[in-house]
Amino acid sequence: MEEIKNGVSRKLFGLQTEGRRPPRTGQLIVKDGKLLGEVTSGNYSPTLECGIAIALLDPKVSLGEKVTIQGRRNEEEATIVKLPFYTAQENS
């Protein structure tokens, strides 16, 4: 009922990292010190040659926006991307 009244609080987005390290479930997503959401699942993509993840984020974020994935010992830069990550038609 609250979502009908106020809109959704989080929405699924894709994340693509700058490096090969895969994001992990539960890692927090931040930008400019503001918590935007968290990773729900992630792995390395051999096709895209980078880490990818699905994350529940604030619905006000924009595709192409740069964010930071916070790990226990490090941080990884990522870009918010459209799902699905890869389609054969786009890349043929």
Image (cartoon, grey):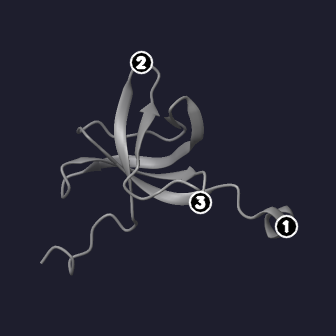
Q: Which of the two discs, 3 and 1, sits closer to the camera?
A: 1
Residue located 26% across and 40% down the image: 18
Q: Which residue is mark 1?
A: 5
Secondary structure of the residue carrying numbered label 2: loop
Q: Position of residue 44 (x, y in %)?
A: 28, 47
- Seen from the viewer's position, the closer of residues 54 and 13 is 13
Q: Position of residue 60 (x, y in %)?
A: 58, 56
* Type of the residue with mark 2: Arg
Residue located 40% across and 66% down the image: 83
When the figure is inspected, residue 62 is found, relative to residue 86, above or below; the finding is above
Q: Which residue is mark 2?
A: 73
Q: Which mark is residue 31?
A: none
- Seen from the viewer's position, the closer of residues 8 and 72 is 8
The quarter of the picture where the C terminus appears is bottom left
84 with respect to 44 (left or right): right
* Type of the residue with mark 3: Lys
Q: Which residue is mark 3?
A: 11
Whichever of callouts 2 and 1 sits on the residue coming sooner in the sequence is: 1
Quick one: which residue is furthest to the bottom in this view? 89
Whichever of callouts 2 and 3 sits on the residue coming sooner in the sequence is: 3
